[in-house]
Image (cartoon, grey):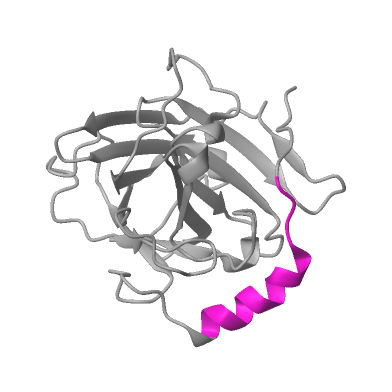
């Protein structure tokens, strides 16, 4: 079994700060009617992944915006839109990712997980359904080239566990529009992998959404819910995905 090496630890001093900040400060750019909530719109059936926001199943679907760094400061040129849909078996996420520079892994492989994919450009979703144990959640990543990786996270043990051997069975699609300087990434995540065997409207999942973009000397870390920490792995900062009709 593989485990994620050299992952950043959670900053325990940030947890209380984040909780207070979330109550006091709204996130600019959110398109949800409720701050900190990404509405996921029901689809009656599963659909093919296209990484196309103009596809019939995505067109007109409202999402949220990620446009700040880990401390809540604006990240110009990287205003990322995230939309979501759900079915009886799957959760879908679509990332619309403007960029200034691409940092892509040479010789991409899309038929299996890519270890340490986070060293390159990625969009990420951290999703947890254990509301009592918020340090346990799942991580999903897609690159502009259609690479993927998924991990099961447990920050409640020492050392923290980043299990890259876990297999969710999720699928991804991606494409790059170089003329528009935007890339698109789409995920289809099995509900059963999230611990939700029978999803219903109104169900909420704890989540945060991120991007890592650009070469290392000019790296950008874009957050939906700013973590107020040096690591994305700050579950007290998570917002919510809410399943809606």
Q: Is residue 40 depicted above or below 12 in this figure?
A: above
Q: Is residue 97 depicted above or below 135 in this figure?
A: above
Residue located farthest toward the right when viewing the structure as drawn: 158
Q: Which of the 4 image quarters holds residue 244? A: bottom left
Q: Which of the 4 image quarters holds residue 119? A: top right
Q: Between residues 140 and 104, which one lies in front from this camera angle?
A: 104
Residue located farthest toward the front when viewing the structure as drawn: 217
User: Range of the magenta residues?
Assistant: 8-23
**Residue sitting at 49 percent across and 32 percent down?**
120
On screen, residue 182 versus residue 138, left or right, reads left
- Quarter of the C terminus within the rendering: bottom left
- Label the magenta part by its dominant secondary structure: helix
**Residue sitting at 46 percent across and 22 percent down?**
105
Q: Position of residue 99 (x, y in %)?
A: 30, 44
Q: Which of the 4 image quarters holds residue 174? A: top left
Q: Between residues 41 and 16, which one lies in front from this camera angle?
A: 16
- Quarter of the N terminus within the rendering: top right
Q: Is residue 11 depicted above or below 168 in this figure?
A: below
Q: Is residue 160 visible?
A: yes
Residue located farthest toward the bottom when viewing the structure as drawn: 24
Q: Position of residue 51 (x, y in %)?
A: 25, 35
Residue 16: in magenta span: yes
**Residue sitting at 41 percent across and 27 percent down?**
104
On screen, residue 49 versus residue 19, left or right, reads left
Q: Is residue 198 visible?
A: no
Q: Position of residue 24 (x, y in %)?
A: 51, 87
On screen, residue 57 versus residue 31, left or right, reads left
**Residue sitting at 61 percent across and 83 percent down?**
20
Count of numbered marks? 0
Residue 101: in magenta span: no
């Amino acid at each position: 079994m593989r485990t994620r090496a050299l992952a950043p630890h959670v900053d325990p001093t940030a947890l209380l700060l984040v909780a207070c900040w979330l109550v006091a400060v709204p996130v600019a750019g959110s398109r949800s009617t409720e701050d900190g909530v990404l509405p996921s719109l029901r689809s009656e059936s599963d659909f093919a992944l296209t990484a196309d926001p103009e596809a019939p199943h995505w067109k007109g679907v409202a999402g949220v915006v990620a446009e700040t760094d880990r401390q809540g400061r604006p990240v110009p040129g990287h205003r990322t839109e995230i939309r979501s849909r759900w079915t009886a078996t799957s959760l879908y996420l679509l990332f619309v990712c403007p960029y200034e520079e691409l940092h892509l892994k040479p010789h991409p492989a899309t038929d299996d997980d890519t270890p340490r994919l986070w060293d390159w450009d990625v969009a990420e979703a951290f999703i947890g359904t254990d509301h009592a144990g918020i340090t346990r959640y799942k991580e999903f990543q897609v690159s502009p080239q259609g690479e993927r990786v998924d991990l099961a996270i447990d920050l409640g043990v020492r050392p923290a566990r980043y299990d890259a051997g876990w297999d969710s069975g999720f699928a991804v699609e991606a494409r790059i529009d170089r003329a528009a300087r935007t890339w698109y990434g789409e995920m289809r995540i099995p509900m059963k992998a999230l611990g939700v065997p029978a999803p219903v409207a109104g169900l909420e999942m704890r989540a945060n959404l991120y991007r890592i973009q650009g070469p290392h000397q000019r790296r950008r870390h874009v957050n939906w819910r700013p973590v107020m920490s040096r690591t994305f792995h700050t579950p007290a900062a998570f917002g919510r995905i809410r399943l809606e009709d």
